[in-house]
Image (spheres, grey):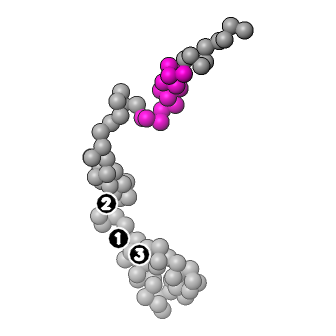
Amino acid sequence: MHNVIDRAIQINGSLGFSGDLPLEQMYRAARPARFYDGPDEVHRDSVARLILRDYAPPPGNVATEHIPTRRATARERFAELLAPTGD
């Protein structure tokens, strides 16, 4: 809501923030409305908890894309190919 009103004020120029249009009153009402139901961080945390509650952490609490862990696994898996040939 705030962004729409802000854009309308910009389109109307100085007339947009004068008392001649209802935009000035809308802007004053919309500005504190951002805080009525809590800051954005609270919403992000709530959504993240809802999404992640169905997931279990990976084994060892290390992300599956953790490069050092993947590198060590690859070295073990391909040890024969990585071994020096003796030439």
Tell me if mark 3 has few (under 14), some (14-19) or many (20+) residues whose alpha carbon lies within 10 angstroms of its own: few
Query: Which residue of the protein is positioned furthest toward the bottom in this rendering?
Result: 20
Is residue 87 left or right of 79 when viewed as pictured?
right
Which of pointers 1 and 3 indicates the residue nearer the eye? Answer: 3
Q: Amino acid at mark 1?
A: Ala
Q: Which residue does the numbered mark 1 point to in the structure image?
A: 33
Contact (Cβ within 8 Å) of mark 1 with mark 3 = yes
Contact (Cβ within 8 Å) of mark 3 with mark 2 = no
The location of residue 20, given as percent across then percent down, is 48, 92
Q: Amino acid at mark 3?
A: Met
Whether residue 42 appears in this view of the structure is no
Give, as a single range, the part of the protein colored magenta: 63-78
The residue drawn where x is 50% and y is 76% is: 6
Q: Amino acid at mark 2?
A: Gly
Tag shown at residue 38? 2
Q: Is residue 31 above or below residue 20?
A: above
The residue drawn where x is 43% and y is 88% is: 22
**The residue tagged with tag 1: helix, strand or loop?**
helix
Q: Which residue does the numbered mark 3 point to in the structure image?
A: 1
**The residue tagged with tag 2: helix, strand or loop?**
loop
Spatial CA span between label 3 and label 2: 16 Å
The location of residue 9, given as percent across then percent down, is 52, 81
